[in-house]
Image (tube, grey):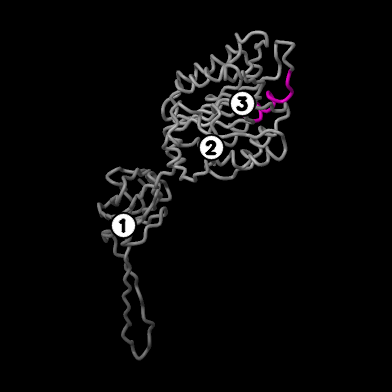
Amino acid sequence: MYIRPALILAAITVTWMLQPLHGQEVESKSVKFLINNLPDTQPPAIRLMSPFIPENDTFQTNTKEFDLIGEVTDESGVKFISVNSDIRNINEAGIFSSRLVLEPGKNQIRLVTSDVLDNVAEQLYTVEYIPPVPTLADKISESSKYYGLIIGIDNYHDPDLPDLQNPVKDAGKLYELLISRYSFHENEMVILRDATRNDIVGALDHLANIVTPDDNVLIFYAGHGTWDERANVGYWFPADAYLNTTANWFRNSTLVDYLKTINSKHTLLITDACFAGAIFNTRSGFKKEDKAYELLYNLQSRKAMTSGTLTEVPDRSSFTRYLIDRLNENENTYLSSEQLFSSFRIAVINNSDAIPKYGEIRNVGDEGGDFIFLKKE
């Protein structure tokens, strides 16, 4: 509270002229009399500074909380100011503020003030809160997490398995890109360099234990792979795989079993390895339907994109290079895995001997949805 002098001085002036004496003129005389102690009957004046609310109008906002800032003044001194019955502090300049939390629809804001002589003023304002319509990005951010398992293998224990030069580097680039540009957080990402079979199994076990039906999972593998035509089985080669025994080979069927137990909303498998297309069980999965992102996201998906079919692919991969380039160049908030694949498929075909492949992984719960990359704002 701050106080100014409460008394108002009123002045009146009385003028008279003295009567002439023996024909002589005299000057008129004026005397000013001060009348003290006239009471102040005017209440304090309230002025809203922020937000600006026109008189007899409604202020609309899509922000649930905002600061009301105003000024209250009075010649006698302000006793208090309240906002919705909450007494607020007033600084020496007469400024007050109040943090308001709004309910959807129209909210009444009542300001009451009094001066030290108990002259009271009241003002009413209407603030209409119109909640913003939640976007798909809002829904995803509120309820979902993006988990990533990124595997790159350059160096093999078996001297009969040639070392590679690029998978570990490619895995690192993808890892950094997903964290920096998309809704993947470092504490939900695992990168395995030169991973053994136990490393891969342990990481998949971890995903199976923590992923919820609202979450999204991306698994990337770059390294050697092979296809057993007699058994009709494809394999990844972990770093501790040996050609003379399948003990540490990682079967596609084992991976499919893990995809069944990782109870995600969407799982996207990206494989850059020889014979990677075996994961599709020879079925072509490339689809051309163009559906709304929200519909795609609402339906469960188990998708895969691979650098080739049942063929060998080179160490220096056009597939991963164009994959990373397109993710880095993307400026859209939403990017489906099908759109991503379509954006670089022809470039890979034109710049390598491999034919990349995309589609759903069969018998693991795909319902026609799609993995959506959500770009950070």
Toward the front, the furthest residue is: 230
Number of the front mark, 1 or 2: 2
Mark 3, secondary structure of its residue: helix
Report whether residue 37 is seen: no
Picture residue at 46% right of the left edge, 32% below the top:
301
What are the residue bounds of the magenta stretch? 163-174
- Rendered-image quadrant of the N terminus: top left
Labels 3 and 2: the sequence-earlier one: 3
- Graded by Cα atoms within 10 Å as few (under 14), some (14 to 19) or many (20 or more), the crowding at tag 3 reads many
Labels 1 and 3: the sequence-earlier one: 1
Whether residue 165 appears in magenta in the rendering, the answer is yes
- Check residue 231 in the rendering and tell me which mark sits there, or answer none: none
Q: Amino acid at mark 3?
A: Ala
Picture residue at 31% right of the left edge, 75% below the top:
14
- Graded by Cα atoms within 10 Å as few (under 14), some (14 to 19) or many (20 or more), the crowding at tag 1 reads few
Report whether residue 313 is seen: yes
Residue occupied by mark 3: 276
Number of the front mark, 3 or 2: 3
Residue occupied by mark 2: 373
Q: Amino acid at mark 2?
A: Phe
Q: Amino acid at mark 1?
A: Leu
The span from disc 3 to disc 2 (Cα, nearest Å) is 22 Å
Residue occupied by mark 1: 7
Image x and y of residue 82, in percent: 30, 46
The span from disc 1 to disc 2 (Cα, nearest Å) is 71 Å
- Rendered-image quadrant of the C terminus: top right
Q: Is residue 182 left or right of residue 367?
A: right
Labels 1 and 2: the sequence-earlier one: 1
